[in-house]
Amino acid sequence: MARRLIVNADDLGRSAGVDRGIVRAHREGIVTSATLMANTTDAAHAGAVARADPSLDVGVHLVLTFARPLSEPTRVRSLVTPTGEFPRRSLLLTREVDRDEALVEYRAQYARARELIGREPTHLDSHHWVHDMPALEWALGELARETGAAARTHDDAQRERLRARGIRTPDRFSREFQHAGHIDVATLLGIIHRLGDGVTELMCHPAEPDAELLSGSTYARERGEELATLTDPRVRRALADRQVALTTFAAL
């Protein structure tokens, strides 16, 4: 069986600098796909970027821990704070989330992303990986079933549960490429060297750090280092040497 690699950039739409970094990592590096945050103030910019570059495979980065819902807050009470905003991840994980309310919001974000990019999103994942919560795994899976989108899975058990529901997924997921000390070229070359047969998704967060990102995210300057690594010529040479083919969720 051949070795294939999806390189997915999370957070398209987080800021204009994130969008620029993702496009550069796609055009000049190894990024093959991205997931769009449809509820941000920069989502329209991300949509324009995606429309201008149809070779970038775009899915939806389903958000419940940043900014505000696209649905009316009264329809998703279990997901929001008293002021109608999404809570921080640490607070969301302590809540009794209503899975049907999550599906309402996920549908709204999917529809908005489809409108912004002018085509059908190809895959789904979640901001801050919150679909490890059973209610949110169910909601993400239900949206995947409705739309035909593929889905990110975080471990073997989750992969098998979603595949049992008829949902397309990669064979494995790698989140090793993140945080200071783990986003240099040597780290990425090591990941490539260890890839097994089948389809692996590698998560990444490239960006050209801008004022919005630097002021609002605890993971900002590191994204510039990720961008430099993902566009380093040694990485493409390693993929060729290991006979790893880049691919997309659309090709699953």
Image (tube, helix red, strand yellow):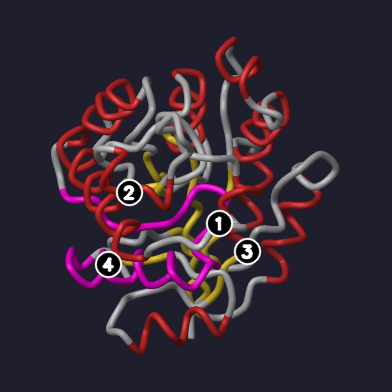
Q: Residue furthest front?
A: 82
In primary-sequence order, the first of circles 4 and 2 is 2
Identify residue type, mark 2. Answer: Val
Inter-mark Cα distance, 2 to 1: 19 Å
Q: Residue furthest right?
A: 181
In the image, which residues are magenta?
Answer: 120-148
- Residue named by callout 2: 76
Inter-mark Cα distance, 3 to 4: 21 Å
Between 68 and 26, the one lying in front of the other is 68
- Residue named by callout 1: 129
Question: Please, what secondary structure does the residue beneath circle 3 have?
Answer: strand
In primary-sequence order, the first of circles 4 and 1 is 1
Identify residue type, mark 1. Answer: Trp
Inter-mark Cα distance, 2 to 3: 31 Å
- Magenta stretch: includes residue 240: no
Inter-mark Cα distance, 4 to 2: 20 Å
218 over 128 or under it: above or below: above
In primary-sequence order, the first of circles 3 and 1 is 1
Choose top left, top right, bottom left or bottom right for residue 184: top right
In primary-sequence order, the first of circles 3 and 4 is 4
Would you say 219 lies left or right of 110 here?
Answer: right
Q: Residues within 10 Å of mark 1 (few under 14, many from 20)?
A: some
| CB-based contact (under 8 Å), mark 4 and mark 1 | no
Identify residue type, mark 3. Answer: Ser
Identify residue type, mark 4. Answer: Ala
| Mark 3 vs mark 1: in front | 1
- Residue named by callout 4: 144
- Residue named by callout 3: 174
Would you say 113 lies left or right of 163 here?
Answer: left
Q: Residue furthest top?
A: 211
Could you tell me residue 55's position as x and y percent? 28, 42
In primary-sequence order, the first of circles 2 and 3 is 2
